[in-house]
Image (cartoon, rainbow, N blue to C red):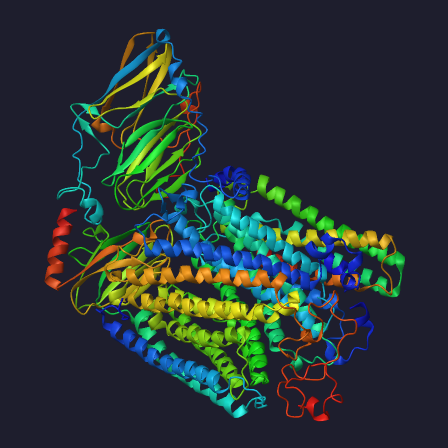
């Protein structure tokens, strides 16, 4: 395919989008369905049954999570910046912004771990001490959804870390932006999912 | 409780894998009995150092009338009886004695000779025989079906790994065992709602169940002072203390009475030797109702 | 084994059987057309030397025909089934003044709760009987299905009745036996070890006999 | 993730076999052809395993009061004193379905043929993401091992049916199965991941890597079918994974998503499962339809009748496939009014299936039928799929479904589409593409023996099951002799069982032919069937990288018996019009 790519490409050969980008879009479609499954179940379980849910600020610390949400949004911005820097061939920018994105992602995870710790050991709900996945459907859905989002963030952070290392090896540049763009797509998706989760799990 | 089962389960993945790769082997039935049921263990006892506890479970007052079990919904079972079904056997009191009482040394014992052989549990005419019995931890229970139709045997312990197996016809025998002490473990048949039994799992050989007239006897007990506990599915538990001297028989008695009906009946209690048994009071999440 | 539905004892069973045979005929025709066509083609058009196949990419006329014809057939079937389905299953179409029972399914028992002589569920004279379902013929019966442990399915072939019993739900089922008889309730949803023998006796009485039976049982409790 | 980014496309497809170690070339290979063949061996093995489980079930159903011969070799927890135990029977039922669907048929349709054909028929060197492709195979292996191992753990393999209906699947205390149920879900999650990775590959490759001139409507129907199938898997599988994970938590962490005691909803599981499950049904049949369309065209020496109608039918089926899941739940206690809407969509989805059937007949009409083994299997696919489709109408009509739901009528129906449909098409595909895969022909003689024995015995096994369903025999029962309304069906059950044993034996004829031909078969030419699609224009087997020069496509996929082509009755997609005749290219 190396030479296939260089061969004259009549329009009917496909989209004028490079393959990895198409692949990522396709992959994200299935990710959408995965979270749709979880969120759909959440909606059915919460509003379809007579099970008990706490008021927004009763159990979950919305303030901390709001800050955390802001952190994640910032990381999307820096990701965009990193890609822009790559297109501009600005090596310094690539390094700085990738590092920032990785750091912000890691920070988000750190805060989430702290949040879990607080909930499990210092929070109490429905009489039972400690808000755990066993704490009724409320706890189960909360930890399942935020947990799987956190898992996706973790994967993202690992890839970002890897991309950062490559950056310091001068891997990225104006002639090599695809990797960053594809990674960026994933990162923005994870960000978007979080905004939805934050809304339905914490605010509603 | 299910998460507990889960922890136990993890260890078994490996076993399962190995067995699978080995193209088979016996992963099932829990027939991997730890009991180390060495027959000679029973022989090593020096008669000069042991005595016997023998006694009687008395029952005062009017024993409740035993209602016949309605088996009309289970023609298979009804066929085993002429006309009326059998009598319910929860309270079997006759001649002033109370049957189906599990009696065991609850304190003062430190282990004892390992079990030898297996304890039979028979299903005949839609009844468990025996209804109340004891085993040593790790000792085999040989479960047999004498009815030529389906019974399932659903044991719901909390300290041990439970099992739920079935025997679709007569002549099938399966072996199960419980690895740690637990008094009592309920056993039921989901096909025939009324079929139930209770097994006391104890990690020493000093236990017995009272017979139809309320008598029981525990042999080969090393000389010493013990706390003896009696358990009945309707009237709850009683304890008494006894001192056993070598080559003699210590007599004890438990006095149950009709007005104890509805007493709190402890279930699935782990037996911790040398320990205030009331120090551990756990409410069982188990039993027929599920979790 | 004779290829037939078991004798039908219920009012709406008649329509169900009719619909079954209607579909049987329609699909039977399609079946014969397809299979006969295939055999004919295999014989008629099998490879012969020097013969060349007829070159065509298809015919829109034909495409339209064999799109529209099945579609029409299915629409008609759909409308017919929809009506009958609503009559049988829709809670709003439950018959008035039916005698009500409660059936509690558990591994591996059908526990039937009888309304007692006063014919009202939830009153003192209710009583429960294991694996024996008695009810009168010639009048509508409503059964409230509940399950204690897992999903079971309440199936009486002769009455053309089937409904899953789901833990946490109370599902009404109605039927109207046209005559007396003795059948079985079978469990149609895998429910564990004893699924295959989770059966209960069904006895459809004349009204008088049913009252007598219920009175005698009520006393026994 | 990292992989996609890291992937320099086609890096693994450089023509450099000699540089590759054996391990890299045949075991951890990223060559789509090797991966396809790896999938083929894996899935054939699981086909045999799944069949064996079915044989044990059939024995139990036919002779419930007889000890099973050789049962002694199985542990007491499965077969006690010679008798299959009900819990083991439930495990057989569950694992037969699960293995056949997830480890045999589905990976054989997609893992084998999507992998093998997409790059070859589209005229590219390899998949878009060869390494992802390799992972998608190596994810199936642990899934398979876990599945087999689960039979030997305490409590045995999963026993709640392949649909894993909660609460039965979530409550160990009610089944005696705890670890087996968990292991099966873990395997399922592996399989889901594998098929998602695969789908990403198939879709991307089809969208972006078609050879010059390979327009959407010049793609062979096989590619269309596999492409749409990949989309179905991509969108349906993650939903199953999500549901499976929740069920896993119910089993192991003590949550209660699907357990009413904790406020959960058993029906939620069914909705999630069937939201995946119905597209899954089409995942299992669409590729088969693709193979059949192609084999029929080649065998009849005619273009596919109504090519575009076929394409739109596939698309329509895929779309409708996502809104009919509820027809599996008519008796589940779901709101009956909801049932109505599902009836409508279900009857609608029958239309495109009808269109396809008629177009297949149209393809054969006035053809020049070469009745070789692949063709025989393709034709019998049409015959048997028709039966499966028609019996489906009974279920779509909800009032009738009240009676036949969960009876053997359903068992007959699903085996007519899954076995008579998918598996017959697969046999056809194996015979058809075997020369390309292994460079040798399979024996026609033994192929015909295999076909006729399979065809006859297959119908003896599954057609009578319609009758059992009419009589009212419930699914998944260990012993039907206890029921008054089931008296007098035992002879039929025994007939079915005997035929089933025979059917299983025919598998050995196939296996013999298959393995014998790999080594001893007649050497195959480039294009043994005189076919038009691109894979036949390369050597058999194609070299690593498929093409030195990417082919350029001038014609539609199935140009047979073109009037302007005089010397032969076929026109390869990449034959230049000026070489043959100017008219030929145009349509």
Q: Quadrant of the C terminus of chain D?
A: bottom right
Counting from the top left corner in percent of width and height, residue D330 is at 39, 67
Q: Where is C11 relative to D139, above or below?
A: below
Total marks shown come to 0
Residue A55 seen from this side: no
* Rendered view: C6 above or below D143: below
What residue do we see at 64% from left, 54% from top? D138
Q: Quadrant of residue D368?
A: bottom right
Q: Residue at 61% of width from left, 51% of height from top?
A: A147
Question: Between residues C125 and D111, which one lies in front from this camera angle?
Answer: D111
* Foreground of the two, D241 or D491: D491
| Residue D464 seen | yes
Q: In the picture shown, does residue D410 fall above or below D359?
A: above
Q: Position of residue A150 (x, y in %)?
A: 65, 52
Q: Quadrant of residue B196?
A: top left
List x then y, in percent, for residue D134: 68, 58
Q: Residue at x 26, y 44 (%)?
A: B148
> Compared with residue A163, is residue B266 higher up or lower down, i.e. above or below?
above
Identify the residue shown where x is 77% and y is 80%: A10
Left of A130 or right of it: where is B62? Answer: left
Quadrant including the N terminus of chain D: bottom right
Front-lying residue, D197 or D509: D509
């Amino acid at each position: 395919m190396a030479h296939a790519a260089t061969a004259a490409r009549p329009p009917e050969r496909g989209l004028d989008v490079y393959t990895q980008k198409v692949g990522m879009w396709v992959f994200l479609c299935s990710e959408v369905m995965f979270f749709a499954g979880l969120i759909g179940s959440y909606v059915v379980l919460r509003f379809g049954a007579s099970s008990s849910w706490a008021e927004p600020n009763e159990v979950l610390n919305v303030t901390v999570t709001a800050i955390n949400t802001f952190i994640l949004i910032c990381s999307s911005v820096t990701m965009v910046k990193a890609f822009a820097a790559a297109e501009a061939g600005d090596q310094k920018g690539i390094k700085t912004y990738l590092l920032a994105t990785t750091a912000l992602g890691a920070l988000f995870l750190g805060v989430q771990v702290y949040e879990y710790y607080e909930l499990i050991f210092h929070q109490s709900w429905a009489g039972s001490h400690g808000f755990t996945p066993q704490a009724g459907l409320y706890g189960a859905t909360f930890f399942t959804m935020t947990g799987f989002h956190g898992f996706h963030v973790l994967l993202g952070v690992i890839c970002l870390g890897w991309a950062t290392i490559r950056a310091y090896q001068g891997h990225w540049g104006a002639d090599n932006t695809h990797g960053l763009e594809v990674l960026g797509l994933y990162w923005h998706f994870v960000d978007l999912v979080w905004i939805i989760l934050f809304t339905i799990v914490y605010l509603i | 409780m299910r998460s507990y089962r889960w922890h136990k389960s993890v260890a078994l993945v490996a076993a399962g894998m190995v067995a699978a790769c080995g193209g088979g082997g016996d992963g099932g039935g829990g027939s991997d009995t730890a009991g180390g049921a060495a027959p000679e263990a029973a022989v090593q006892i020096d008669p000069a150092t042991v005595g016997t506890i023998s006694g009687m479970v008395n029952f005062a007052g009017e024993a409740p009338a035993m209602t016949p079990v309605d088996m009309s919904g289970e023609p298979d079972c009804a066929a085993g009886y002429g006309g009326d079904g059998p009598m319910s056997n929860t309270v079997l009191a006759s001649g002033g004695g109370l049957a189906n009482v599990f009696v065991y040394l609850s304190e003062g014992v430190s282990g004892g000779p390992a079990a030898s052989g297996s304890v039979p549990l028979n299903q005949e005419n839609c009844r468990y025989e025996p209804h109340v019995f004891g085993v040593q931890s790790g000792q085999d229970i040989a479960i047999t079906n004498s009815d030529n139709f389906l019974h399932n045997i659903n044991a719901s312990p909390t300290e041990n790994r439970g099992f739920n197996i079935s025997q679709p016809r007569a002549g099938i025998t399966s072996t199960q065992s419980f690895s740690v002490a637990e008094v009592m473990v309920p056993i039921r048949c989901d096909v025939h709602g009324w079929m139930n039994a209770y097994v006391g799992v104890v990690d020493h050989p000093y236990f017995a169940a009272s017979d139809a007239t309320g008598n029981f006897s525990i042999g080969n007990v090393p000389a010493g002072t013990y706390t003896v506990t009696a358990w009945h599915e309707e009237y709850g538990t009683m304890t008494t203390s006894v001192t056993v001297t070598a080559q003699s028989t210590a007599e004890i008695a438990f006095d149950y009475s009709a007005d104890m009906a509805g007493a709190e009946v402890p279930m699935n209690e782990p037996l911790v030797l040398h320990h205030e048994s009331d120090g551990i009071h756990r409410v069982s999440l188990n039993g027929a109702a599920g979790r | 084994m004779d290829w037939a539905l078991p004798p039908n004892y219920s009012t709406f069973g008649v329509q169900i059987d009719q619909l079954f045979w209607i579909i049987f005929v329609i699909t039977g025709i399609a079946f014969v057309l397809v299979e006969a066509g295939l055999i004919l083609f295999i014989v008629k058009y099998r490879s012969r030397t020097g013969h060349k196949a007829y070159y065509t990419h298809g015919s829109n006329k034909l495409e339209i025909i064999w799109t529209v014809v099945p579609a029409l057939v299915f629409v008609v079937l759909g409308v017919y089934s929809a009506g009958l389905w609503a009559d049988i299953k829709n809670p709003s179409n439950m018959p008035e003044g039916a005698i009500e029972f409660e059936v509690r399914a558990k591994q591996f028992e059908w526990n039937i709760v009888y309304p007692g002589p006063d014919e009202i569920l939830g009153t003192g004279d209710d009583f429960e009987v294991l694996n024996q379902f008695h009810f009168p013929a010639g009048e509508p019966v409503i059964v409230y299905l509940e399950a204690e442990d897992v999903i079971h399915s309440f199936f009486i072939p002769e009455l053309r009745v089937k409904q899953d019993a789901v833990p946490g739900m109370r599902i009404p089922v109605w039927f109207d036996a046209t005559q007396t008889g003795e059948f079985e309730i079978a469990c149609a949803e895998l429910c564990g070890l004893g699924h295959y023998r989770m059966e209960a006796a069904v006895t459809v009485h004349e009204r008088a006999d049913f009252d007598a039976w219920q009175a005698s049982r009520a006393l026994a409790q | 993730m990292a992989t996609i980014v890291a992937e320099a496309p086609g890096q693994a497809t450089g023509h450099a076999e000699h540089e590759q170690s054996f391990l890299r070339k045949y075991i951890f290979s990223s060559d789509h052809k090797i991966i396809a063949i790896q999938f083929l061996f894996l899935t054939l093995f699981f086909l045999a395993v799944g069949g064996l489980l079915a044989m044990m079930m059939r024995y139990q159903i036919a002779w419930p009061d007889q000890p099973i011969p050789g049962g002694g070799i199985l542990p007491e927890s499965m077969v006690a004193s010679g008798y299959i135990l009900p819990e083991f029977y439930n495990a057989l039922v569950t694992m037969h379905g699960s293995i056949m669907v997830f480890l045999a048929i589905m990976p054989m349709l997609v893992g084998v043929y999507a992998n093998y054909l997409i790059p070859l028929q589209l005229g590219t060197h390899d998949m878009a993401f060869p390494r992802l492709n390799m992972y998608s195979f190596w994810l199936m292996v642990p899934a398979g091992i876990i599945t087999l191992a689960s039979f030997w753990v305490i409590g045995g393999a999963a026993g709640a049916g392949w649909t894993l209906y909660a609460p039965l699947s979530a409550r160990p205390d009610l089944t005696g199965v705890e670890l087996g149920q968990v292991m099966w879900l873990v395997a399922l999650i592996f399989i889901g991941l594998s098929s998602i990775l695969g789908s990403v590959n198939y879709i991307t490759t089809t969208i972006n890597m078609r050879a010059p001139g390979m327009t959407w409507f010049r793609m062979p129907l096989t590619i269309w079918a596999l492409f749409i199938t990949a989309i179905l898997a991509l969108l349906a599988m993650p939903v199953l994974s999500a549901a499976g994970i929740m069920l896993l938590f119910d089993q192991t962490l003590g949550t209660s998503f699907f357990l009413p005691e904790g406020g959960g909803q058993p029906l939620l599981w069914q909705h999630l499962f069937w939201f995946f499950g119905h597209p899954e049904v089409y995942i299992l049949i669409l590729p088969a339809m693709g193979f059949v369309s192609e084999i029929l065209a080649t065998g009849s020496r005619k273009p596919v009748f109504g090519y575009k109608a076929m394409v739109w039918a596939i698309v329509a089926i895929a779309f409708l496939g996502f809104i009919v899941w509820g027809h599996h739940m008519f008796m589940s206690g779901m709101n009956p009014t909801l049932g109505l809407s599902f009836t409508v969509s279900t009857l609608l989805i029958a239309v495109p299936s009808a269109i396809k059937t008629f177009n297949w007949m149209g393809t054969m009409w006035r053809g020049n039928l070469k009745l070789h083994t692949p063709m025989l299997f393709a034709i019998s696919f049409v015959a048997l799929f028709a039966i499966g489709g028609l019996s489906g109408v009974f279920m779509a009509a909800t009032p009738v479904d009240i009676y036949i739901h969960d009876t053997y009528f359903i068992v007959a129906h699903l085996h007519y589409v899954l076995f008579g449909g998918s598996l017959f098409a697969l046999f056809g595909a194996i015979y058809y593409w075997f020369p390309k895969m292994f460079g040798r022909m399979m024996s026609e003689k033994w192929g015909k023996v295999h076909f006729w024995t399979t065809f006859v015995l297959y119908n003896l096994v599954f057609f009578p099951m319609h009758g059992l369903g009419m009589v009212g025999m419930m699914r998944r029962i260990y012993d039907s002799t206890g029921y008054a309304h089931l008296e007098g069906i035992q002879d039929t059950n025994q007939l079915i069982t005997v035929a089933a044993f025979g059917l299983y034996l025919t598998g050995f004829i196939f296996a013999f032919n298959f393995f014998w031909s790999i080594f001893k078969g007649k050497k195959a030419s480039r294009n043994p069937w005189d076919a038009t699609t691109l894979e036949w224009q390369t050597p058999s087997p194609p070299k690593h990288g498929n093409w030195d020069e990417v082919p350029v496509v001038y014609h539609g996929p199935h140009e047979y018996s073109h009037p302007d082509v005089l010397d032969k009755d076929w026109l390869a997609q990449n034959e230049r019009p000026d070489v043959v005749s100017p008219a030929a290219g145009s349509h």
